[in-house]
């Protein structure tokens, strides 16, 4: 039986890992390569790196991080953040990432998903979506709106429509982040996650709000997610991957163990 | 101990199909000397060959044929030296793939099938295609390559098609995804894996290490 994946997310700025609450107040917490190795040895199933470096000229630093991570860890990992062309996707994949995630740039230019899928295969292309709950209206029937540029710009695009559209364009997976839940450690947005996961036939990674193993249990059952992204709850040592997996396995969720 | 692998060289077949670099990185981590090569002459003379690959069978066969690698691989296998197939490489050693109706190398009788549309698990819940993520391999018999591995553990898969050898005895391991499918094949000097050992953490690396030490003999 296919196991549910537990995926630590490392936000990287100028080559350092950071973690902020609701995209603000980021503080440095460590070397991404060291953290990647730590999570690999602890039994993480996959890793996500999010490059939050503001300037394009520092993009090279991230490629170097990707290269070093690929030499050290032998599980899949994806890289996202500011990627807006097939050439940038190629650079990340050549440096050793298994997948590349596109977010704001795909909203501005949906054809980027199609081009990426055609060049590298759908399994390499992850759509990252940042979503905020809004009052439903005819233009946003699901009541969830896609936001871009790190949560700052409202697009007027319905999240449910966009998820389906991205699947049609060739995205192989969706990483769904709730801006409302992100960094709160109060639990994932279950309604949103279940709605998207049931609407598409590609895997959905739930993101934003994990603070307790119970939150992962909820999103992998009620939330119908295929995988759960975590950050704060393990970055600061509150829980280990092993503790989370023990908790899930005791409750009947199939998870992978290291031997 | 540091010199155990000194003379061992693994050749990785380069046919512009995906995961070559990740296989190379994994071998480098294990300190196993390897070389990525698109040259059929070099492959033919190699001590051991890894035949990896990600992508579509039709495209892959075209590249193999245009480089003369199809014949080189067949002759290499006939020589009795060890070959390890990974993912698309595993599928291509069979006769035929239903992916774009592609005739393949025919090194092992059998065919490649797609998981069916509307695929469901045993409780009737829909299963996503491709089959992507960590799933368990159940080994059906003994083999030198798997002796250092735990009996049942998970490996990393990404695929929509799976190999079906004509003879059931060629199946070394199976994996459950709606139904059990062959996830590892073994015959004579060939082992072929549907999953990615280079992305499967410590047990995957252990498998690659065992391949580097294997002389190409099956249990009998």
Image (cartoon, coloured by chain):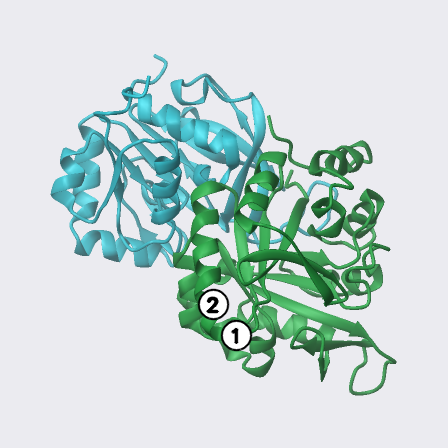
Chain colours: A green, B cyan
- The crowding category of the residue bearing disc 1, from other C-alpha atoms within 10 Å (few below 14, some 14 to 19, many at least 20), is few
Q: Which residue is mark 1?
A: A55
Looking at the image, residue B35 lies above or below residue B77: below
Compare residues B124 and B21 and report the one nearer the observer: B21
Q: Residue at x 26, y 49 (%)?
A: B14
Count of number-bearing discs: 2
Q: Are marks 2 and 1 in contact (CB under 8 Å)?
A: yes
Quarter location, residue B152: top right
User: Does residue B156 lie above or below A209 as drawn?
Assistant: above
Looking at the picture, how far across and down is residue A102, in whole percent? 56, 69
Q: Residue furthest left?
A: B41
If the image is split into quadrants, where does the N terminus of chain A sit?
top right
The residue depicted at 66 percent of the width and 41 percent of the height is A3
Q: Can residue B59 be seen from the camera position used here?
A: yes
Q: Is residue A97 visible?
A: no
Residue A17 position within the rendered picture, expressed as x and y whole percent measured from the top left: 61, 55
Q: Label for residue A59?
A: 2
User: Do the residues at discs 2 and 1 belong to one chain?
Assistant: yes
Res A119 label: none
**For the residues marked 2 and 1, what is the alpha-carbon distance in whole angstroms?**
7 Å
Of residue A13 and residue B95, the one placed in the foreground of this image is A13
The residue lying at 44 percent from left, 32 percent from top is: B205
Residue at the farthest bottom position: A138
Q: Quadrant of the C terminus of chain A?
A: top right
Question: Helix, strand, or loop for circle 1?
Answer: loop
The chain carrying label 2 is: A
Q: Position of residue B107 (x, y in %)?
A: 27, 37
> In the drawing, does residue A252 fall left or right of residue A68?
right
């Amino acid at each position: 039986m296919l196991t549910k994946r537990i995926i630590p997310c490392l936000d990287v700025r100028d080559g350092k890992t950071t973690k902020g609450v609701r995209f603000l107040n980021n503080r440095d917490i460590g070397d991404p390569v060291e953290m990647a190795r730590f999570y690999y040895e602890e039994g993480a199933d996959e890793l996500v790196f999010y490059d939050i470096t503001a300037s394009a000229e520092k993009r090279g630093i991230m490629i170097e991080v990707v290269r070093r991570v690929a030499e050290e860890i032998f599980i899949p990992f994806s890289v996202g953040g500011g990627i807006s062309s097939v050439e940038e996707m190629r650079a990340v994949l050549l440096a050793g990432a298994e997948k590349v995630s596109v977010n704001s740039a795909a909203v501005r230019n949906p054809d980027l998903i199609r081009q990426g899928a055609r060049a590298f295969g759908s399994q390499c292309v992850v759509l990252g979506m940042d979503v905020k709950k809004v009052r439903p209206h005819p233009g946003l029937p699901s009541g969830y709106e896609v936001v871009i540029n790190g949560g700052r710009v409202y697009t007027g695009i319905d999240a449910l429509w966009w998820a389906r559209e991205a699947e049609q364009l060739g995205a192989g997976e969706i990483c769904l982040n709730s801006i409302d839940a992100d960094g709160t450690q109060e639990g994932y947005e279950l309604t949103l996650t279940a709605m998207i996961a049931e609407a598409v036939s590609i895997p959905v990674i739930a993101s934003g709000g994990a603070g307790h193993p119970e939150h992962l249990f909820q999103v992998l059952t009620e939330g119908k997610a295929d995988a759960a992204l975590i950050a704060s709850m393990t970055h600061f040592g509150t829980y280990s991957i092993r503790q989370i997996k023990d908790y899930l396995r005791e409750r009947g969720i199939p998870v992978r163990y290291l031997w | 101990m540091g010199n155990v692998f000194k003379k061992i060289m693994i050749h990785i077949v380069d046919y512009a199909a995906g995961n070559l670099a990740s296989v190379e990185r994994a071998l480098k981590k294990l300190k196993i000397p390897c070389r990525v090569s698109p040259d059929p002459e070099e492959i033919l003379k190699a001590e051991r060959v890894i035949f990896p690959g990600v992508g579509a069978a039709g495209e892959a066969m075209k590249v193999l044929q245009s480089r003369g690698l199809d014949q080189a691989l067949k002759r290499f296998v006939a020589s009795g030296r060890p070959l390890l197939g990974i993912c698309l490489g595993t599928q291509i050693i069979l006769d035929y793939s239903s992916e774009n109706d592609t005739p393949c190398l025919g090194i092992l009788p059998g065919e490649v099938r797609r998981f069916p549309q509307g695929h469901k698990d045993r409780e009737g819940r829909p299963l996503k295609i491709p089959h992507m993520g960590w799933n368990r391999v159940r080994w059906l018999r003994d083999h030198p390559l798997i002796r250092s591995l735990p009996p049942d553990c998970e490996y990393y898969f990404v695929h929509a098609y799976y190999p079906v050898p004509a003879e059931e005895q060629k199946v070394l391991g199976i994996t459950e995804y709606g139904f059990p499918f062959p996830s590892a094949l073994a015959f004579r000097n060939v082992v072929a894996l549907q999953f990615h050992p280079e992305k499967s953490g410590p047990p995957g690396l252990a498998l690659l290490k065992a391949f580097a030490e294997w002389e190409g003999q099956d249990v009998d």
